[in-house]
C-alpha cells in the first residue's frame, strides 16, 4: 500500500489540506494518508522530510498560503527551495501547492481558488503515483491549477 504525505500550515487562511485529502480519497484507493501540520510555510520542508523519514510516504503534497507582503513572497521562495531540496534528497515527488493571498480579490474568491488549486494538485499527486500516463497525455496543454487553463500555443506555420 502506498502512502501519501500531506503537509499544511496553521498560517493558511483556508484548510487546503481538507480539500486535497477529500479529492485524494475520491480519486481512488490503495493508499494511506499521513498528515503533518506546521505553523508556517518555512516549516513545510522539515515536515515533508519527516513524512518521508518517519512515515515512509511515497509522495508529499505541501500546501501553504503566503501572505500579501513582500516578505511573505520571500519566505515562500525559500520554502519552495527547501521543498525542492527535500524531494531531490529523497528522490521522491513533492507536489507544492501554494496560494498567495494577493492572487484573489476578497475572501470568497480566495477560498474558491485555494479549494480548486488544492484539489487539482491532489489529482496531480495521485496521477504521479498511479496514472503517470495521464500526465504524459497532457504534455504541452497549458494546464493550470486553480485558474482556467492557458491552453497550448497555436503555431501558424
Image (tube, rainbow, N blue to C red):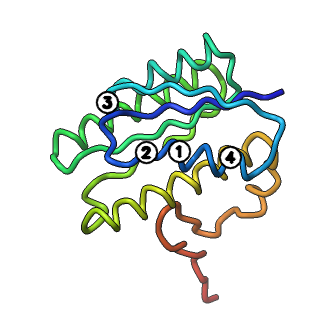
Residue closest to the far bottom: 156
Within-10-Å neighbours for mark 3: few <14, some 14–19, many 20+: some
Please state, as top left, top right, bottom left or bottom right, where the N terminus lies in the image: top right
Residue that mark 3 sits on: 40
The reply to whether dot 3 and dot 4 touch (C-beta < 8 Å) is no
Instruction: Point out residue 157 in the picture as x, y percentages from the top left corner.
Output: 64, 88
Q: Of 10 and 143, which appears nearest the observer?
A: 10
Instruction: Point out residue 66 in the picture as x, y percentages from the top left corner.
Output: 29, 43
Q: Give the label on residue 24, or none.
A: 4
On the picture, is 30 further left or further right than 101? right
- Using the numbered discs, state the Cα–Cα distance from disc 2 to disc 4 in whole angstroms: 15 Å
On the picture, is 31 further left or further right than 9? right
Name the front one of labels 1 and 4.
Answer: 1
- Using the numbered discs, state the Cα–Cα distance from disc 1 to disc 4 in whole angstroms: 10 Å
Residue that mark 1 sits on: 18
48 lies above or below 68: above
Name the front one of labels 2 and 3.
Answer: 2
For marks 1 and 4 on the same chain, the one whose residue lies earlier in the sequence: 1
For marks 2 and 4 on the same chain, the one whose residue lies earlier in the sequence: 2
Q: Give the label on residue 15, or none.
A: 2
The reply to whether dot 1 and dot 2 touch (C-beta < 8 Å) is yes
29 lies above or below 56: below
Q: Of 151 and 75, which appears nearest the observer?
A: 75
Amino acid at each position: 500500500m502506498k502512502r501519501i504525505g500531506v503537509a499544511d500550515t496553521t498560517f493558511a487562511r483556508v484548510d487546503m489540506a481538507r480539500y486535497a485529502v477529500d479529492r485524494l480519497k475520491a480519486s481512488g484507493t490503495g493508499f494511506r494518508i499521513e498528515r503533518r501540520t506546521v505553523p508556517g510555510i518555512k516549516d513545510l520542508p522539515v515536515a515533508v522530510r519527516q513524512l518521508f523519514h518517519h512515515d515512509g510516504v511515497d509522495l508529499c503534497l505541501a500546501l501553504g498560503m503566503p501572505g500579501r507582503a513582500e516578505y511573505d513572497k520571500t519566505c515562500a521562495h525559500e520554502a519552495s527551495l527547501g521543498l525542492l531540496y527535500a524531494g531531490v534528497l529523497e528522490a521522491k515527488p513533492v507536489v507544492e501547492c501554494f496560494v498567495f493571498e494577493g492572487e484573489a480579490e476578497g475572501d470568497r474568491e480566495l477560498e474558491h481558488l485555494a479549494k480548486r488549486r488544492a484539489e487539482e494538485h491532489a489529482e496531480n499527486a495521485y496521477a504521479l503515483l498511479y496514472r503517470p500516463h495521464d500526465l504524459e497525455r497532457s504534455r504541452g496543454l497549458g494546464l493550470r491549477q486553480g485558474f482556467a487553463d492557458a491552453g497550448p500555443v497555436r503555431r501558424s506555420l
